[in-house]
Amino acid sequence: MVVVMQDDIDKILSDIQANKLAKTYEEEKTRDLLEIDEETAKKLALERKNKVSGFKLNLNLDDDGDGTAQNRPDDAGDGEKNQSVDVGGHQDTPAPDTGFAQESREFDENQKAPKAKRAGGCVRGIIYAVFVLAVSAVLAYFAIVGVLDLTGLFKSDIKVPVTLTEEQIKDIDEVSRVLKEAGVIDQPFIFRLFCKFTGAAGSFVPQNETPLSADMGYRAIINALRTKIREVVRVTFPEGMTIKEIAEKLEDNKVCPASEFLLAMDNHDFTHDFLSEIPDGEEYEGRFYKYEGYIFPDTYDFYVGSSGKTVLRKFFDAFDNRVDATLRAKIKSKGMKLNDAIILASLIQWEAAKPEDMYKVSRVLHNRLAKPSVFPRLECDSTYKYIDIMTPPAGDSRIENMDYDTYKRKGLPIGPINNPGLEAIKAAADPSDDKSVINCYYFATDLKTGETKYSKTLAEHEAWCRARGIGIYGKK
């Protein structure tokens, strides 16, 4: 019979119950503590195991049944049967299976410790945030660029010719490429999307140098590309035409109204370098047109119904290309300003009967300009012609103009009297050194024969004119 003291049993049961509660608490704590590592989990399990193994139970089986319990495992009598149980201890005698050790082992083997928090989580978060911001910024940039390209806001208003063939208009990718290369659009991809969403793709017609500009926006560009090829007219402007005559010819050929062409000179700023060399100010208020002399005479192809600004730019482009840096350097080497050379060239254009005479006429005019004390005035009849064109006389009475009349004004007139050709401009920059004219100060042309006479003295000049009835000597 096993005799155990009631107090000891109660104590054992109480301890067992406490250990169970402690184990439950520890397990719950382990589940809640997600941040602990594996080593900490093992320590907690070992701690629980030691608590259970710390209790030792000695039971003495007394034949007399007096119920005495001994706490001395080695002090047994002759008639006693001594059984010692060391719960969870290291005695050779096996201990009763209380279940606690087994549960601890199962916990050690099966319970997985929570994963430790990764140290790089914060860094990855920052990188992700930066990535999101960068992507957002890029998307915002392309959105703004796309809107500006679509609407044409803040884009160039310069018209550029765009040509599309029958084959090209069938492929929206090819159309967008041509427009991109011409500078009409900046975002071919967005243009293609716009055309597909609006149904414009496939609706274009062939174009032949259709003027388009980036500031038009996609809708206006698409409308232009849906319009049939514009009618082209070829117009030739001979050397020596005035701006007034050129404007009238533009209108006659349905290029643009004369008034629109003339207004374009005052309402628009152009960027050609040579324009900055045209003088301005109060002393030049008497000029009829500031750009007289710079509308380069040539043969041009225009679209019917062009704007005055587009036409004027075309003339300026031609002047800039033909009166190039080499020719301008030549003019400068002669000690002349560009504007003075153009004025002189306009006189040469009307005074010389033939191109080969231009360089000799230039020599005479240069000789007179070089001696202002002897020849203060050029006395060119051609300036009267310009005055009559710009201010038609009333009957036989010519309107006096001191700014252009070289019989009354000293030196060159206030501005060019026509738009000279390239040969006249070259002659102004490079007068003839031929011995027959090197010291001449007068010239006259017989319009009947085309002969030009160069004279050194006034007497020689007047005698020749009188003999042929030229100038004042031709009047009855």
Image (cartoon, rainbow, N blue to C red):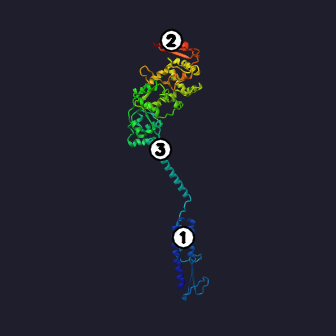
**Is 348 in front, or is 187?**
348
Q: Which residue is mark 3?
A: 145
* Mark earlier in primary sequence (1, 3): 1
| Amino acid at the residue labelled 3 | Val
Q: Secondary structure at mark 3?
A: helix
> Residue at point 57% right, 72% down?
47
Q: Residue furthest right?
A: 74
Would you place residue 145 above or below residue 167 in this image? below
**Is 246 in front, or is 408?**
408
Q: Which residue is mark 1?
A: 105
> Residue at point 46% right, 26% down?
243
**Is 281 in front, or is 167?**
281
Depth check, mark 1 against mark 2: the one in front is 2
Image coordinates of residue 336 in percent, x first then y, are 57, 26
Image coordinates of residue 410 in percent, x first then y, are 54, 23
Q: Which residue is mark 2?
A: 466
Would you place residue 100 above or below residue 409 in this image? below
> Residue at point 38% right, 42% down?
198
Tags 2 and 3 in contact by the CB under 8 Å rule?
A: no
The residues bearing labels 1 and 2 have C-alpha atoms spaced at a distance of 142 Å
Image coordinates of residue 277 in percent, x first then y, are 54, 30
The residues bearing labels 2 and 3 have C-alpha atoms spaced at a distance of 76 Å
The residues bearing labels 1 and 3 have C-alpha atoms spaced at a distance of 68 Å
Q: Quadrant of residue 108?
A: bottom right
Q: Visible in this render: residue 282?
A: yes
**Is 136 in front, or is 331?**
331
Q: Secondary structure at mark 1?
A: helix
| Amino acid at the residue labelled 2 | Arg
